[in-house]
Image: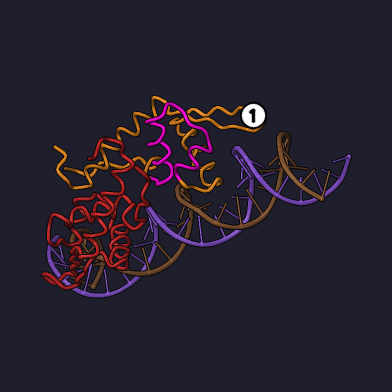
Chain colours: A orange, B red, C purple, D brown
Amino acid sequence: MAFAPLDPVLHNQLRLAVVSLLVTVESADFNFLLEKTGATRGNLSVQITKLKDAGYLNVKKTFKDNYPNTRCSLSANGLKAFEGYVLAIKEYLGTPQV
Amino acid sequence: MAFAPLDPVLHNQLRLAVVSLLVTVESADFNFLLEKTGATRGNLSVQITKLKDAGYLNVKKTFKDNYPNTRCSLSANGLKAFEGYVLAIKEYLGTPQV
DNA sequence: CATTTCTTATTTATAATATAAACTTATTTA
DNA sequence: TAAATAAGTTTATATTATAAATAAGAAATG
């Protein structure tokens, strides 16, 4: 049991929560993520951008009912990174992982 | 499944590794932690101090074979915090926890 | 119909954090 | 006694996180 490095993009509470949600949900818009995470809009905006810049998210900006709408989904790389993160952090958690 | 807040003291790679080691080991000195974590001395020094200031570690500074020796052990609060962190982050990881 | 308020964000400013590099103090060895 | 080693600590800087401020248009209100 070594200590694998933890992907710094994912090792952040809000970004991890966003990715965690997107694993289960195909796609989600800004307000959905806002509500589920309890983040502020500013913080969520920044962290979505970082996840997108890292290539972990696909982000489509459209208009829905006349309002801007930001819809996010996990990319293949994002899923791979998340799975890697899960494996890596489990090494730190100490409970028998087998 | 909500997103529990992640204790910011523990949500750091090196501090988490240190605490994770100390859960299994009763006590450990600076060089042991240095070797097991692969950290730099400076970073390890800073993070041990933070863990101590948070009340998660007991730190005894003595001399061993004429050299300064810093020996750390997990406090009761530290153990409790670690257990809480493990539960909290598992909520983010998505694999069935039951 | 103009102005206030709401919606959906983005940008910025600041505070907090992480980390490497430099430094300190003392010991051992050549 | 000078150089190398040991065990840390301090500092300087870069990165990150986050709240506060701003923006641009839509809807409601008087």
- Name the residue beneath numbered marker 1: A65
Q: Is residue A58 above or below residue B53?
A: above
The foreground one among B16 and B80 is B80
Say what secondary structure mark 1 lies in.
loop
Instruction: Give residue D9's position: percent from left, percent from top.
Output: 31, 69
Q: Is residue A94 above or below residue B22?
A: above
The question of residue A17 being in magenta is answered with yes
Q: Chain of mark 1?
A: A
The question of residue A44 being in magenta is answered with no
Secondary structure, magenta segment, majority class: helix
> In the image, what residue type sits under mark 1?
Asp
Q: Categorize mark 1 by other alpha carbons within 10 Å: few (<14), some (14-19), many (20+).
A: few
Instruction: Give residue C19's position: percent from left, percent from top.
Output: 36, 51
Q: Magenta span covers which residues?
A: A12-37
Instruction: Give residue B87's position: percent from left, percent from top.
Output: 26, 49
Q: Is residue A50 above or below residue A13?
A: above
Instruction: Give residue D24's position: percent from left, percent from top.
Output: 73, 38
Q: Is residue D7 left or right of residue B45?
A: left
Q: Quadrant of the C terminus of chain B?
A: top left
The residue positioned 23% from the left and 42% from the top of the image is: A90
Q: Quadrant of the N terminus of chain B?
A: top left
The foreground one among C20 and B87 is B87
